[in-house]
Amino acid sequence: QVQLVESGGGSVQAGGSLRLSCTPSERTFSPAAMAWFRQAPGKEREFVVGRMWNGNAEWHGASVKGRFTTSRDVAKNVLFLDLRNLTPEDTAIYYCAATSRSLSHLTTEYDTWGQGTQVTVSS
């Protein structure tokens, strides 16, 4: 079974930026769509942004629209999440997920999850 590995998390001050990566264990992995979710302590997992695997269209969660964007390295089959203008409210564990169905904001629609990477934003 394919595994997803996130990296790039860390600590940053408010207003800063980070780039997260999500690398599938199989180079030929081709889901229908992938997405990033996040989960802060004591809160439910929240949809951040997702995209169809073969295409550029994105769907953003309301809290991050305009600040977070995804991109792909097609040759390496890596999904990136660029986080800009970070605020302390963005502090969470960030997960990438893949679905064989269609892009969705629902966690239940995703078949494969990474282990998560911590993002901490200080004021």
Image: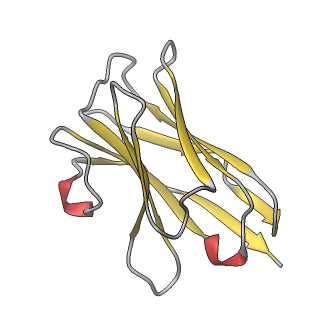
Asked whether the viewer can see residue 115, the reply is no
Is residue 48 shown above or below 77? Answer: below
Q: Is residue 78 above or below residue 115?
A: above
Relative to 50, 10 lies left or right? right
Figure quadrant of the C terminus: bottom right
Residue lying furthest top: 75
x, y percentage for residue 69? 56, 45
Q: Quadrant of the N terminus?
A: top left
Q: Residue at x 81, y 58 (%)?
A: 16
Image coords of residue 84 (percent x, y): 71, 54
Q: Position of residue 83 (x, y in %)?
A: 66, 53
Q: Picture quarter containing residue 55?
A: top left
Instruction: Judge by depth and name the residue closer to the eye, 19 or 113.
Output: 19
The residue under the point 54% across, 65% down is 93
Q: Is residue 50 left or right of residue 102?
A: right
Seen in the image, is 10 located left or right of residue 22?
right
